[in-house]
Amino acid sequence: MALIKPLKLRAQKVAVRKVKAPLNPVARVIVDTKVFHLDEPYSYLVGEEISSTLCVGSIVKIPFGNSLTEGIVIDRNGTDPTAGLKFIDAQISTTAPLTSAQISFFQEVAKRYGCSLWDVLRLALPSFSSTGEKKAKISPTVAVAQGAGARGVAITVKQGSLIVEEVLRISRLQSDSKTVVIVPDSKSLQKFSQIANVLLQAESAKSLRYANYLEANYLNDGIVVGLRSSIFLHLNPSDQLIIVDEADSNLYERHMPTYNVRDLALMRATEQKVIFMSACHSLEIERLIDVGYLDSQEVGTYGRSILSESTSTSHAVISEGLKRGNVLILHANVGYVQSFACQHCRNLAICSCGEKLLLGRDNKSTVCPMCGAKSANWKCSYCEKSLPRSLSKGVIKRAEDYGRSFPNVRVISASAQSPIQELPAERTLVVATPGMEPEGIYAAICLMDGEQVFGRTGLRSDEQGQLLWSNALCKLANNGEVFVSLAKEHPVVQGLTRNSWRRTHLSEIAARSSAQLPPEYRLISIEGEGLEIGNLPVIFEEMMDSGEIRTIGPIGPITPINPTDRLAGTSRLIVKYPVSLGSIVARKVYEINRVRSLQGRKVFRVSVDPYEFI
């Protein structure tokens, strides 16, 4: 017999009656609506219970439609009408993670990149953590000191100067202010960790990441070191901003809004001192130096000898270098063997999925980098012979080959898959991929695979190659030797020989200007369904007729390398316009997307000045 449980009365919750704040009872809030066209601020009533702690920059929970969502307070006032307004449900953050100066800056960024303010907030602000907020050791007051006058400086770091020591020297010149140092990657972050008062690491736990952010945001003096999102930190007029290797691809955001750190730093240069520090600057910085917008300085006095494949061999340079100290050899490819063919029929080794196979260290096993298919004993699919022939060797295979050529020397390989931070104590021959060379001083450096490094497609591939090679040469000993695997007439060899990229860069800027490309022109990539992209040029017709802009495309359908990046089959329109137009074109594209959102259609994917178009 089933037991009948006694009935229970449901407890009825009585809503607490809220009373509006007596002073400044209205807060304007940017709401996370997740709808593109609903991006304007909304007004809410401030309850008396949170009135004393709620300020500009606070995170709040607010009713929107039939649900609760998050928002950021951007203003409090007592002049707006209060009739019909809903109350803020709760204040989430005790300490406001944003200042009014930051919000004003974010609004300018949104205009420049044709996006909503919440899109910028999403990239600038780490996920809230109540535990992290309690951990943070801060005094939530911003000390505003008088700045020494906004100015920009480009410092070229050469041999004989350590970039960490240069940053420390510059920060000591303004020891009573905050210095924010932005570096491109985790390897650089660790290098600068020794001088940082606050280190912003993406790998940190959520609570620690939020605590470090609050400490960095409200720090009034000291050094903050972080990655690209650190560009959004609060800065007083007396603070300074140092961008390390601004041409590095890691300082470009891939998600909307596709900002780059250099561009945002230049926006802040009207109020703060901004320093660009690199062994090789981008064409944008070179142009600004040329027109006098940025001052130019050089540090480092070491000399060197440049030998090309026209006048010497890498083996001779390595042999001489090992007599004096460590030797570094840069090769472009990671791993063991990147591609191989059949020795018998010379056909390329291809997986059934269509990708090139990678050969194992036993010279028999293979693996496909795309589908993961493995084979213990490879056989050619054309002639069924088992005779692999290496076509593209990685640094591990190269290290083995150099070990046979120099049997009495320790040989090590370094790459992103097997990083090595510092040189061993003994004399060493290092084979590394560009950017992953261990810290130390080298008697000789060999820059290999030059045609591969400077033969890649992409608008900024040469800039990246020049930067990586220049950074490596900063580790060269005084009067050391450099072997370059290019002919002596090549522009890269000429730049290395002159120990300056200026002439090469100015020539490239002139060529790009005639083709209406950066740095004197800006590019916007708009992606969407083919037919709709095809109709876009009509919208820009008036600006095109006046000669202000030019469009390329529609191009497509696009087949992306990484299918998760964008939908296959979409088309693209590229809009080119002079930098003098500022944010006009980006705002035009923003209005197009806003109308599409109002009509219930999917908004276009917009990339302003993307690093690459692939």
Image (cartoon, rainbow, N blue to C red):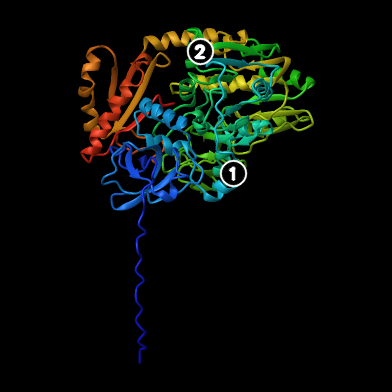
Image quadrant where residue 39 sits = top left
The foreground one among 417 and 333 is 417
Amino acid type at circle 1 is Ala
Residue at the outermost front position = 22
Q: Position of residue 274 (x, y in %)?
A: 54, 20
The foreground one among 55 and 517 is 55
Residue 286 marker: 2
Q: Which residue is mark 1?
A: 136
Residue 168 marker: none
Q: Position of residue 354 (x, y in %)?
A: 41, 39
Image quadrant where residue 607 sits = top left
Residue depicted at 49% across the width and 11% down the height? 293
Are there few (<14), some (14-19), or many (20+) residues within 10 Å of tag 1?
A: some
Residue depicted at 65% across the width and 19% down the height? 473
* Mark 2–mark 1 distance (CA, rounded to whole Å): 40 Å
Please say whether residue 566 is visible from this viewpoint: yes
The foreground one among 62 and 268 is 62
User: In which quadrant is the N terminus drawn?
Assistant: bottom left
